[in-house]
Amino acid sequence: MPARSLLLALLITFIWGVNFVVIKLSVTDAPPLFVAALRFLLAALPAVFLVPRPAVPTRTLVGYGAAVGVVQFGLLYLAIQLGVSAGLASLIIQSQAFLTALLAALFLREPLRPHHLLGMTLAFAGMGVIGFAGGGHVSAVGLGLILTAALGWAVSNLLVRAAGSASMLSLVVWSALVPPIPLTLLAGLTEGWDAVGRTLTQSGAGFWAAVAFMAYFNTVLGFGVWSRLIQQHGAARVAPLSLLVPVFGLLASALYFHETFPLPKILGAVLVFGGLLLHVFGAALIRRRAVTA
């Protein structure tokens, strides 16, 4: 990959990693589901008037918007507000890679290789360590919300495959029209319309800067550049770099929030990240070993 493309990929993974800290800051005093709604509303406007509608069926467009906006990010924001640290959230949600493989095996008949299964076993063992031996740092509810958010991400990955060669930037922008209404309704019903109104009328410049960062830098710029890099250099070269997202997320959380990592959290994080590495690079390692044997 050319140096310019590699630097762009690193920039996007950095933005995506830091975004977990921005989420944590944005949901401190605001309903998390409504914050997610504002993020997608800004991501859609005004870009929807500048980007053509993606050439996909309406059900795919709506399904992608619901999976990403309502399930993935709605539950992620809620979990972070309930106490899951930004760093651990950035790591645990990467379990979407395993859930995507499981859904593809179930619905698309794609085979699960031994290294996939071993990677899943290591990662979910690590999540168990984090959840049950982490000294109360992660509640069972928070962990469950993150895993359900990862399932929403996995579903969206299958919908991207169904979208074929459609522009990912167009899909991201137009699907951003889907989440704001259901997320706003859920926020009003669960936290009260007064809290929604206060967010709109009393939030300061820092809050709106955080929402704008999540909408324009993380969503529109991030997905737009990432999809372009994949088109230019192929998914096999670009996609593995997403493993740097939890690295940047953990570092940013540690630096900004002074997050500590007791031994159980470190052990769990190592198992999860090791499982991800095995899942992504296991096939290449097996092929290299076969060639050298």
Image (tube, rainbow, N blue to C red):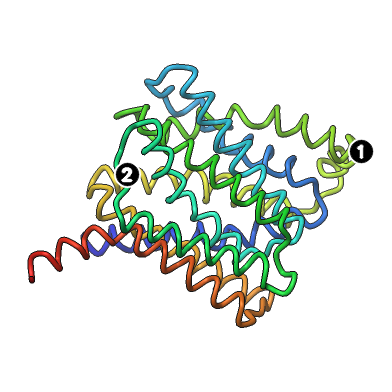
Instruction: Give percent across and percent down for residue 101.
Output: 39, 45
135 over 47 or under it: above or below: below
- Relative depth, front residue between 38 and 149: 149
Q: What residue type is labelled 2?
A: Arg
Question: Which residue in the protein does label 2 denote?
Answer: 228
Instruction: Give percent across and percent down for residue 210.
Output: 66, 54
What's the residue at 29%, 46% (across, down)?
230
Question: Left of 106 or right of it: where is 3?
Answer: left
Q: Which amino acid does label 1 sit on?
A: Asp
Question: Left of 281 or right of it: where is 139?
Answer: right
What's the residue at 20%, 63% (across, down)?
286
- Relative depth, front residue between 23 and 290: 290
Question: Which residue in the protein does label 1 denote?
Answer: 194
Counting residues from the start of the chain, the first of labels 2 and 1 encountered is 1
140 over 190 or under it: above or below: below
Question: Left of 253 or right of it: where is 169?
Answer: left
Q: What element carries label 2?
A: helix
